[in-house]
Image (tube, helix red, strand yellow):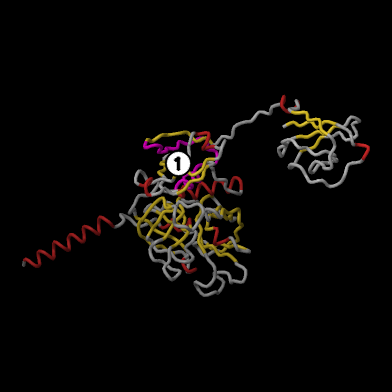
Amino acid sequence: MPRRTGFSVFFALIVCLFLTTAPLSAMPEETLEHVVSVLPVWPGHEQGGQGASPGTAPEGSGVVVRRGVIATAFHVVEPAERVDIRLLDGRVLPARLIAGDAASDIALLSVETDLVPFEISPAPGLAQPACAIGNAFGLGLSVTCGVVSAVGVTNAGFNAVEDFVQTDAAANPGSSGGALVDAQGRLIGMMSAIFASGADANIGVNFAVSGKLLMRVTDALLADGKVEYLSADWRLGSADNAQLAKAAAPVVGTVRAGGKAHAAGIETGDLILEIGSRRTRTPRDALTALALLPPQTTVVDVMVLRGGAEKTVSLSFVEPTRQPDLAAQKTPIRIAPIRLQSARCARLSFRCPVSIRSAVRPGSQATCLSPTGMWSGTARMQRFILPAVRKPPRSFRQPFAVILSF
């Protein structure tokens, strides 16, 4: 009797644990309508879905992000000569490549059909249930489920710009470009890469481009056909052990004079703790934080650690408007009377038979004047002095002036 009672209690605990961890409801069936199979035609390869054995032809997946617009992994379509998509109902339609961004491994396709886009999920939490939907091994759309294992992953090493959601939901070749969704069928991110150990197959460490980065890149590609990422005009490095003892943050190695970080008051040796509301622990964290900012961003707060004290500065991305100095343009700053030498001004439309020995900066204006005006003219200097190429005519061996203006 005591054993039976103990077993009953154990069984009840297992049931309660299952009920508290299992999803309350199944994923909505219509979720799969927002996902497609991507069938690229790579040079020298058969097209998937055209009789090739499953897993032998290049195939991928895609998610609907705008009406008639599909996002997929750039590495799926980059080498393709043609791309088709296969819908959930089995129809195969031609797709057109709109644009792609290799840095984030995102490409956009357009199709002539009315596909309904995903609803984007709020930022996911750790251990939150998540399901991956994709065309694994070219077998058609299927669903695997797990949890959100990590968020804000920037150091996986697959792409130049990374903001990954990590999951243990199974993903395999063909899943690239597929969807990672929450229990309500909302899009958490787009499947992009997997860690594999010895074989190109799932081991439970898989990565999806975050919904935030996906839509940031999507908006830019649709608007401009390319993605412009904001820069702070700094070079960041990894903190050493002494600095890590104070805070895990990237350290400012150099600041470009006159650049954005310099104007904000950021100094060499500062530790970058936060950019906007995003905590930064490594240089790649900082790169991602800037990459996620919309291109129209004018200013962002940056928290730095300097001399043991935290300080928040405003990093502006607005380029200062430089008013032309008309007076400086019209007024020569130096008149250097010299004699003719055997040289000429670089890349001038006329020959200036003079060696300009004074400091002439590239891009300055030089006017060579002779008493008779025969050698007068104005042209833009491209560099400093060229070596002598010929002797000037004897008749021009007389003093004249070189007027330099910057």
Q: Quadrant of residue 391?
A: top right
- Residue 198, compared with residue 278, is above or below; it is below
- Residue 306, compared with residue 46, is above or below; it is above
| Residue at 13%, 64% in the rendered image | 8
Farthest residue, direction right: 395
Q: Quadrant of residue 129?
A: bottom left
Q: Residues within 10 Å of mark 1 (few under 14, many from 20)?
A: many
Compare residues 207 and 273 and report the one nearer the observer.
273
Compare residues 348 and 337 and report the one nearer the observer.
337
Compare residues 195 and 61 and report the one nearer the observer.
195
Q: Picture coordinates of residue 186 (x, y %)?
A: 42, 51
- Residue 61, compared with residue 287, is above or below; it is below
Q: Quadrant of the N terminus?
A: bottom left
| Residue at 31%, 56% in the rendered image | 23
**Is 283 one of the magenta-colored residues?**
no
| Residue at 47%, 33% in the rendered image | 314
Farthest residue, direction left: 1
Q: Picture coordinates of residue 31 (x, y %)?
A: 43, 56
Q: Picture coordinates of residue 389 (x, y %)?
A: 84, 47
Compare residues 11 and 396 and report the one nearer the observer.
396
| Residue span colored magenta | 285-308
Relative to residue 76, is residue 344 drawn left or right? right
Q: Quadrant of the C terminus?
A: top right
Relative to residue 177, is residue 24 drawn left or right? left
Q: Amino acid at mark 1?
A: Gly
Name the residue that disc number 1 marks: 269
